[in-house]
Image (tube, rainbow, N blue to C red):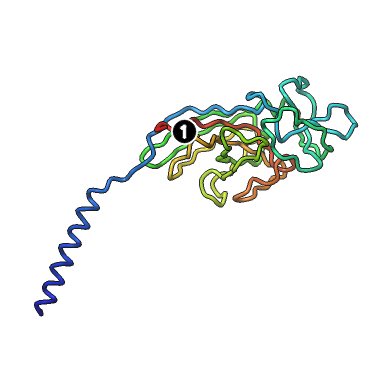
Amino acid sequence: MRPFLLTSVAVLAVTMATQSNAQDDIKVSYDAAESMSLTFIFHIDDGMAEQDVFYERVPGSGEVFRPTAATRDMDVPLYAPGIEVKHNFLDTTDTGPYPKGRPLGLTLGDWFAAKGSGTYTCSNGVGTVDLAFENLVPGGVYTIWHDFMVWPPTDPFIGTYDLPFGARDGSENTFVANGDGSADFERTISPCLQLSGEHLAADLGLAWHSDGQTYGPLPGEFSTVTHVQMYVALPERTSL
């Protein structure tokens, strides 16, 4: 072997050894470990109007309104509106009226009977949610969303940014409730969930699709076919 080749081989060997040692010294950085219990709530539990289901205050009027905590009749049937009604969480006066659309086959009592709870953990860059639901719409098609809202909120409210839980194509956030309305949702994701921060409030939202369809990376049109039934706020990151 020629001398310059011997020198080149030696330099390459030293370089590879140096890179290998440097890689051995690199420490993978993960989000801080997290472990928390999750309890889903309704919009009225946060002092807001329900956003995506509506009832007719005067039967036969053709006008529907968002339920609030003051709506006491649990036997009233629920409807979709005849037009899209955008979310407006922070304006408690934005309740209607709106033109009545198709019946949803539920009463207000059915809607508020739903329950959801579970746990979330994050360790070594892997997040795990384990959720259990009761009294959902029997056989209902549901999706789970990782939602973000500017915090403190803007005035006027500019809406939320809704990401499907897990894969960005929406292939991992769907499930169908059992005939008795029960359902389990257990998934692992990497990286871990982004929790609330200095400028964004984060939550997990549970949406029912009254048309039996899901829309991949998009929730679908809120109020007419997609109805957020419950959600759980995610706390600030441990490191903040």
| Residue at image mark 1 | 120
**Could you tell me which residue is drawn at 23 percent across and 48 percent down?**
25
- In depth, the one of 202 and 187 nearer the eye is 202
106 or 47: nearer the viewer: 47
Query: Looking at the image, is 75 positioned above or below residue 130?
Result: above
Helix, strand or loop for disc 1: strand
- In the displayed orientation, state which residue is furthest to the bottom: 2
Question: Which quarter of the figure is the N terminus placed in?
Answer: bottom left
In the picture provided, is 66 more to the left or to the right than 60? left
The residue positioned 70% from the left and 45% from the top of the image is 221
Residue at coordinates 48% horizontally, 41% vertically from top-left? 187
Does 28 sit left or right of 104 as displayed?
A: left
Q: Look at label 1 and name its amino acid.
A: Tyr
The correct choice, above or below, for 164 with respect to 231 in the image is: below
- Residue 57 location, x and y as percent? 84, 27
Picture coordinates of residue 225, whole percent (x, y): 72, 43
